[in-house]
Amino acid sequence: MKDFTELNLDSSILQAIEKLGYKEPTPIQAKAIPVIQSGKDIIGLAQTGSGKTAACTIPICNRINISDNTIQALIIVPTRELALQYATEAQKVGKIRNVKAFAMYGGEDSGLQEEKIKDGVHVLIATPGRLIDFIYSRRIDLSQVATLILDEADEMLSMGFYDDLEFIIQCLYHSHQTLLFSATMPEKIKILAKKHMKEPIEISLNTGVMTPKNLEHAFFYCAPHEKEDRLVDLLKFFNPNQSIVFANSRWQCEKLQKILSRNIRDVDFLHGGLAQDVRTIITNKFRTGKTKHLVATDVAARGLDFSGITHVFIFQLSDDSDVYVHRSGRAGRLDRKGMVISLVSKYEMRAMKKVCLRVKCEPKWVEL
Ligand code: AMP
């Protein structure tokens, strides 16, 4: 696939794509767009940073019937940030066609959200909880939804949204297309897909290795009590363009930000306990490069597209190697080079071995 003109898209969408500066489709776009246009279901195992958001928003905005002021595409995502990211992309792709896209999530005034929906929304992006509130209180009509997208399905599962997802799927009892995207494919997701999807086409861009191949995986050995100081040293040593530091809890996230800020400039923190407007400000500052370093928890950083990140630091390895895949995927997006540095103490050697097996790498030790 050489360019977007071969994809049977409306000229208004092609113009918008040109304005976005996308010269040619990414592999997932080249594979997924024709299948989405054919109306078939998809299970997509996609690398993070693969251009998945536009792979969905392009055919969806292309297909919306503008004269019909109903919700025709419903996108379910785990976090508010990801909802906003999708809405922004859909607004850009659908701008010239006048497609109306809107992100709805918890923590914001539901009265205003209701007004917005009444006003007319074609593409609704929602987090499960808030959507279910609207369904229960009969404030939303999903009868015209032609495409349902479940994105970051594995993350929604690990956040405990399985029953909510089933409920939402069951609310769409008319025939519709379902697209399910996930970075990993746990058994429960397979079961969900089998139960609710019609002969889905499988699109896998991970081909064995579950993290982008342009990533370098490195490990730094130190004693547990030295980790905070050594993190400062590592950041100073690598001096990244932009970096994200993963913490395992809100408490740890704030503590690390305080320690780093004493030594390094431009460090913010992001976790799910912050008010939504604060999260949006921090996210935007980081995305536009005004902040260089972000200490974050997994929930807050999941799925976010921060294209300037060159380094990911993992303060404490999780025993679950899926967590590593998600974290490391924040760097090296869209084939840019990236490095992941995990701080490993003797208590995390087992987790490190699991990670190395998972991403098929030999442990490469960093020395300062
Ligand atoms: P995503 O995987 O959807 O988070 O996208 C990662 C990044 O790729 C975003 O910054 C997009 O704006 C960008 N992107 C998406 N599609 C293309 C494309 N065809 N060409 C260049 N950049 C793209």
Image (cartoon, grey):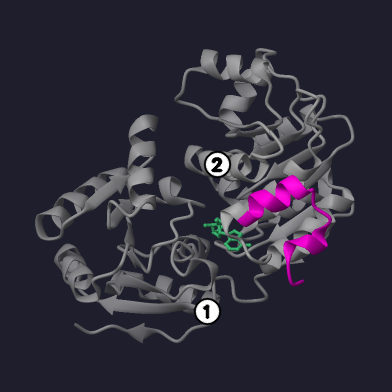
User: Viewed as shown, does residue 368 lie left or right of 29?
Assistant: left
Q: Secondary structure at mark 2?
A: helix
Identify whether 296 is placed above or below 218.
above
Main SS, magenta residues: helix
> Toward which corner of the image does residue 156 lie, by quadrant?
top right
Seen from the viewer's position, the closer of residues 336 and 174 is: 336
Is 5 magenta? The answer is yes
Q: Position of residue 37 (x, y in %)?
A: 84, 51
User: Viewed as shown, does residue 141 lie left or right of 153?
Assistant: right
Q: In this view of the protein, can residue 74 be seen by the observer?
A: yes
Q: Which mark is residue 88?
A: 2
Identify whether 5 is placed above or below 79.
below
Q: Amino acid at mark 1?
A: Leu
> On the rendering, which quadrant does ligand 1 occupy?
bottom right
Seen from the viewer's position, the closer of residues 203 and 225 is: 203
Disc 2 crowd, CA 10 A, few/some/many (<14, 14-19, 20+): some
Say which quadrant the N terminus sits in.
bottom right
User: Viewed as shown, does residue 338 lie left or right of 266?
Assistant: right
Q: Position of residue 286 (x, y in %)?
A: 34, 51
Q: Amino acid at mark 2?
A: Thr
Say which quadrant the C terminus sits in.
bottom left
Q: Which mark is residue 10?
A: none
Q: Which mark is residue 357?
A: 1
Q: Position of residue 203 (x, y in %)?
A: 76, 64
Q: CA distance from mark 2 to mark 1?
A: 37 Å
Q: Position of residue 257 (x, y in %)?
A: 21, 51
Q: Which residues are magenta?
A: 1-18
Q: In this view of the protein, can residue 56 be seen by the observer?
A: no
Mark earlier in primary sequence (2, 1): 2
**Residue at x 16% of width, y 49% of height:** 258
Q: Secondary structure at mark 1?
A: helix
